[in-house]
C-alpha cells in the first residue's frame, strides 16, 4: 500500500489541472547516487499495462512492478520549508540516505 497526504494529493490535482491533462502520478525508483536508489516522480497521461494503480484521496498513484518492493508502505507528503517546497517521501523500508538527501538505501 502506498498513501498520499491531503496536501500532496491537492498539489497533484492542481498541477494536473494546470497541465490540462493527466490521470495521476507515476512513482518509481532508479539506481543512482551515493546510497543506491532515488525516487522518480512524473505525471501520467496514459498508464502502461504493467502499472499498479493505487487510488488514494482522489489521486491515482501508478507504480511499476519492479519499484513496488521498495515502495511498500510509502507515504507521499508535500512540504514547505521556508522558500523551498516539494514532495517528501516517508519510506519505512529506507535504512538510510546520503548526506545530500538525493538517494536512499534499503
Image (tube, rainbow, N blue to C red):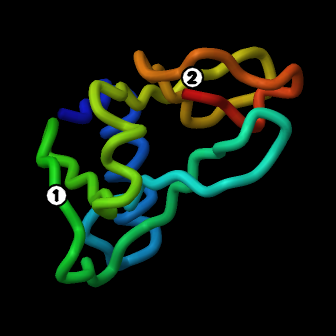
Residue 96 lies in quadrant: top right
Q: Which image quarter holds the N terminus?
A: top left
State the separation of the CA atoms marked 1 and 2: 24 Å
Please provide percent x and percent y for residue 15.
45, 58
Residue at point 38%, 61% (across, down)? 26
Q: Position of residue 68 (x, y in %)?
A: 32, 48
Query: Dot 1: few (<14), some (14–19), or many (≥20) neighbours within 10 Å?
Result: some
**Vertical comparison of 80 with 70: above or below:** above
Q: Residue 34 versus residue 63: which sits nearer the camera?
A: 34
Left/right placement of residue 34 relative to residue 57 reads right
Label count reads 2
Q: Is residue 80 left or right of residue 56?
A: right
Is the residue 18 above or below the residue 71 in the image? below
User: Element at badge 2?
Assistant: strand
Residue located at (26% from left, 81% from top): 48
Q: What residue appears at the point 71 percent right and 16 percent down from the top-left corner? A: 81
The answer to whether the residue labelled 1 contacts the one labelled 2, judged by CB atoms less than 8 Å apart, is no
Instruction: Give neighbour class at mark 2: few <14, some 14-19, many 20+ (Cα, 10 Å).
Output: few
Residue 79's disc number: 2
Query: Which residue occupies the foreground of this view, 98 or 15?
Result: 98
Of pointers 1 and 2, the one earlier in the residue sequence:
1
Mark 1, mark 2: which one is toward the viewer? 1
**Vertical arrangement, residue 19 with respect to residue 102, above or below:** below
Q: Quadrant of the C terminus?
A: top right
Q: Quadrant of residue 73?
A: top left
> Which mark is on residue 106?
none
Element type at mark 1 = strand
Point out residue 79 in the picture as x, y percentages from the top left corner. Answer: 57, 22
Q: Which residue is mark 1?
A: 53
For image coordinates 41% across by 39% down, the residue present is 70
Going by the image, does 88 lie left or right of 45? right
Residue 13, compared with residue 94, is above or below; it is below
Amino acid at each position: 500500500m502506498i498513501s498520499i497526504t491531503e496536501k500532496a494529493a491537492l498539489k497533484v490535482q492542481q498541477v494536473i489541472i494546470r497541465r490540462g491533462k493527466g490521470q495521476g502520478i507515476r512513482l518509481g525508483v532508479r539506481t543512482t547516487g551515493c546510497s543506491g536508489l532515488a525516487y522518480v516522480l512524473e505525471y501520467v497521461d496514459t498508464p502502461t499495462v504493467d502499472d499498479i494503480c493505487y487510488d488514494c484521496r482522489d489521486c491515482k498513484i501508478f507504480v511499476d512492478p519492479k519499484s513496488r518492493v521498495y515502495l511498500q508502505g510509502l507515504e507521499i507528503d508535500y512540504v514547505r520549508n521556508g522558500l523551498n517546497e516539494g514532495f517528501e517521501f516517508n519510506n519505512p523500508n529506507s535504512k538510510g540516505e546520503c548526506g545530500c538527501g538525493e538517494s536512499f538505501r534499503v
